[in-house]
Image: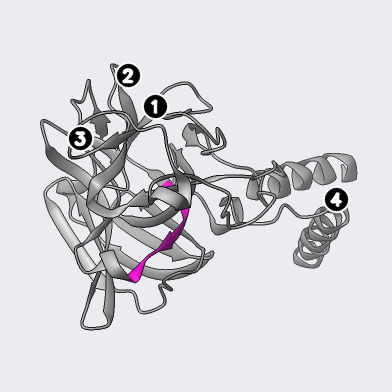
Amino acid sequence: SMKHILTLLAFVVLARYSSGGTVSYIRFEENGGSLARDETGLLDGDLISFTSNQKLPGGGDTYGAGWSTDTPCSTIPQTGEANTTSMRINGGSTFIDLSNSATLVLGYSFTLEMFIKPDELAAQYGAGIFGFGSDYTDQLFFRIISSSGNSSFTSLFMETRVSFPAEEIRFNAWQHVALVKDQGEYSVYLDGQLLHNEELSPTTDGPYEFHNPITGSRTIGDGFRGWIDEFRISDEALLPSQFLNATIPEPTTLGLLGLGLLSLLIRKRK
């Protein structure tokens, strides 16, 4: 019946614009102290000093590392949540340590996304956006490298390293970046636009699981210099319309999409 068709269309449209299962979501909204809380409770992080391996209270922009009011947006487009603070990482001296007794399970398909504002100064050393592994051996990482004015993204999937040019990356400016891993391929998006897609060998399929890491083996910003905000991990390959920087359509927009799909079905039936 027409009612059943409209109900099905509503589910299809809402599914298209809904987020996948969130495994970890670190928002950096504490604005004080050394703890960066995970909204899921899984991977609460600590701001750590490389040199002393001690927790730092955070100094924001003044001391080069810590809490900052410099954010990519005042409201997160996908969730509508207020966004007031971010985390400033100071190159090789600090990083966010996510090591605890929790097991991180990403499975075979996943998405890691965040907002970044890198400094050009540190990019030449390989600014690590995130890295996961065990016993100091990375199994999954994502970095920006800049040399002679040319930028590139480098990733590691199991023991397979991939790299590609990323001239679209801007320094001293906020951008949203997403790494989407699906079986047999990976994709990188910048501000919701596909930057690169590449096939991967079966040896990289997974599953990706990280158990009881030690300090330094599960990190955000290892070698990064700049700002990071809204770090989220999802346990499926998200669509760009599901990223944190994607605006949720208004109800009228959803209705128009549903009508469009309905008219398409009617034309096909005719």
Rendered residue at 36%/49% (across/down): 89
Give the residue type that dot 1 points to.
Leu
> Which secondary structure, mark 2?
loop
Q: Are marks 1 and 3 in contact (CB under 8 Å)?
A: no
* Foreground: disc 2 or disc 4: 2
Rendered residue at 76%/55% (across/down): 249
Q: In the image, is residue 42 above or below residue 124?
A: above
- Main SS, magenta region, reads strand
Among all residues in the image, which is located at the extreme front? 62
Crowding at mark 4 (Cα within 10 Å: few <14, some 14-19, many 20+): few
CA distance for labels 1 and 3: 14 Å
* Foreground: disc 1 or disc 3: 3
| Residue under label 1 | 43
Q: Are marks 1 and 2 in contact (CB under 8 Å)?
A: yes
Q: Are marks 2 and 3 in contact (CB under 8 Å)?
A: no
Going from N to C along the chain, the mark reached first, 2 or 4, is 2
Q: Quadrant of the C terminus?
A: bottom right
Give the residue type that dot 3 points to.
Gly
Crowding at mark 1 (Cα within 10 Å: few <14, some 14-19, many 20+): many
Q: Quadrant of the N terminus?
A: top right
CA distance for labels 1 and 2: 7 Å
Q: Is residue 224 magenta?
A: no
Give the residue type that dot 4 points to.
Pro
Q: In the image, is residue 135 above or below residue 71?
A: above
| Residue under label 4 | 251
Picture disc at residue 102? 2
Write the start and end of the magenta stretch as one range.
112-120
Residue 48 x, y percent position in the rendering: 29, 34
Rendered residue at 36%/70% (across/down): 196
| Residue under label 3 | 216
